[in-house]
Amino acid sequence: MTQEEVLQVAAVILALLFAYIPGLKGWFDGLNTSYKLLIQLGLFAVIIFGAAAGACLGLLDYQCASWGSAMLAAFLLFLKVALANQGMYQLTRLVAKLRGAE
């Protein structure tokens, strides 16, 4: 699996955990929106940089040219994820607002 695929699977798992696990859902729903976004981004950072480190240490099944290139690629991937996450959040807020206006 590539880093992108690992991240996609992790994002789906995190979304399902926060949406359906009763104790986690209640705790997460009670948080301020800013904290929710920071927690999601923090978890994504752990997954992305963990996958890059795992590749460089030979723990995962994809190649690592060097630590520097792996961390740069991880950082760029994190930026993409952060932008996509924020875009999706804004889109879901717009849809919720439009549904409330009906």
Image (cartoon, rainbow, N blue to C red):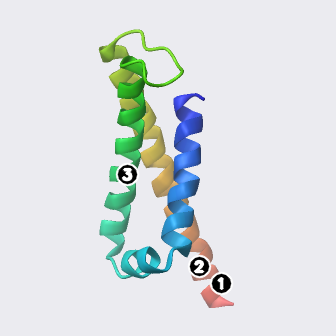
The residue pinned by badge 3 equals 43
Task: Please give the name of the residue rendered at 58% of the width and 55% of the height, measured from the top-left corner.
Answer: 12
Viewer-proximal residue among 57 and 98: 57
Q: With respect to residue 46, does 88 lie above or below?
A: below
Q: Secondary structure at mark 3?
A: helix
Q: Amino acid at mark 1?
A: Arg
Q: Position of residue 30 (x, y in %)?
A: 36, 82
Mark sitting earlier along the chain (3/1): 3
- Is 33 on the left or on the right of 87, as rendered? left
Q: What secondary structure is found at the residue carrying circle 2?
A: helix
Q: Name the residue carrying label 2.
A: 96
How would you rate the neighbour count of disc 2 (Cα within 10 Å): few for under 14, some for 14-19, many for 20 or more? few
Look at label 3 and name its amino acid: Leu
**Contact? badges 2 and 3 (CB < 8 Å):** no
Asked which secondary structure carries label 1, the reply is: helix
- How far apart marks 2 and 1 lie (CA) works out to 5 Å
Crowd band around label 3 with a 10 angstrom C-alpha radius: few (<14), some (14–19), many (20+): some
Percent x, y of residue 6: 55, 38
Residue lying at 58% horizontally and 46% vertically, measured from the top left: 9
Residue sitting at 49 percent across and 80 percent down?
22
